[in-house]
Image (cartoon, rainbow, N blue to C red):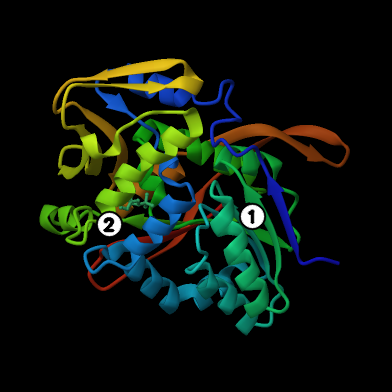
Amino acid sequence: QSRLQITQFASDPSSTASQPGLDVIQGLSKTPKTLPAKYFYDDQGSQLFEQICELPEYYPTRTETAILQAYAAEIATITGPSELVELGSGSSTKTRLLLDAYVDMGLASWYCPIDVSGGILKQSAIHLLKDYPTLNIHGYVGTYEAALAALSPSQLPTRMICFLGSTLGNLNPQECEHFFAELTQALQPGEYLLLGVDLQKSVQQLEAAYNDSQGVTAAFNLNMLHHLNQLFQGDFQVNHFHHQSFYNLDKHQIEMHLVSQTAQKVNLAALDLTVEFEPAETIRTEISRKFDLETLKQQLRSVSQTGAQASGGGEIAAHKELTPLRTWTDANQWFGLVLCQC
Ligand code: AVJ
């Protein structure tokens, strides 16, 4: 029997929405203009992101890796045999630390990576199967929403949904609250959520991390326009935009923008959309919120989800909550891990 199964949803990341690209139309039709951050991640964008993770200025990945290196065994001890579901799995590099911990304890390992970028998901799944002879993988290529809704029941006594790398920071506070409720819905009572979040720190350090000297972040930001050109038959002239990012102190978030260099018109034929830009007008392509662990834990505790739950043949109303069990940080308090139980 094959150790690898992949469930693929349609290739356009918005296809689960009522209308493909509706979010692009909505974002580009308002003032100020915005685009959803998920459009960064075509295969090229995912590769650029992997390069970002290696940059000297981009501290989050190596800091989170160090925390996982130190505490993965502790996490595995708390959960016992647990299926790992990872949102935005990318190259799955950090997940190896968790898989190692389960394997070292002699526990079975099941991994369900979820990513919008099928190329990188399949490639990393194949490498993982080679390196972990007892591992089984069920990958989902699609948005978090589509994949979470389609998840098979856990293959092991419990399940841990891992949302690492501070991707949570892409959601504004309302979206975040909604997302926690969705995650709670996807979890059974007793199951776990592991969150990795970037913490508040000096403006100087934050801005350096999103304006690297090699220009990789700029290429990553601009690549979104190539991706949209491909998805929606667009004619963005990528060299007529430039990368900008800065820390918004009031909102505790990095904002990434693409700044129009001139007055220009852009057409996205497949969306039947023409957009006009004024000189210096910007598209906000990403927010990356920086968290305070105490505030985040408060927020998690306030998530509650009431839904139908099957019980001995009948349906009863079940009240589900997220309880933060443990937090771990590095010595500098740059990055945090929060383990919650449903
Ligand atoms: C993958 C969303 C966590 O916000 O730091 C990196 C993406 N953007 N550099 C982040 C990103 C610019 C990253 N996340």
Question: Image check: 149 left or right of 71?
Answer: right
Label 1 amino acid?
Answer: Gly
Question: Image check: 85 left or right of 339?
Answer: right
Label 2 amino acid?
Answer: Val
Q: Is residue 161 visible?
A: no
Q: Which residue is identified by label 2?
A: 216
Q: Is residue 178 visible?
A: yes
Above or below residue 303? Residue 265 is: above
Residue at position x 54%, y 46% in the image: 116
Above or below residue 269? Residue 296 is: below
Q: Which residue is identified by label 1?
A: 190
Above or below residue 222? Residue 43 is: below
**Front residue of this view, candidates 328 and 115:** 115
**Front residue of this view, candidates 309 and 76:** 76
Q: Quadrant of residue 125?
A: bottom right
**Front residue of this view, candidates 175 and 244:** 244
Q: Position of residue 199 (x, y in %)?
A: 27, 56
Q: Position of residue 148 (x, y in %)?
A: 63, 43
Q: Secondary structure at mark 1?
A: loop
Q: Secondary structure at mark 2?
A: helix
Q: Position of residue 114 (x, y in %)?
A: 59, 51
Q: Quadrant of residue 227?
A: top left
Question: Image check: 315 left or right of 257?
Answer: right
Above or below residue 184? Residue 57 is: below
Residue at position x 67%, y 72% in the image: 129
Q: Quadrant of the N terminus?
A: bottom right
Residue at position x 38%, y 21% in the image: 267
Q: Nearer the viewer, mark 1 or mark 2?
A: 2
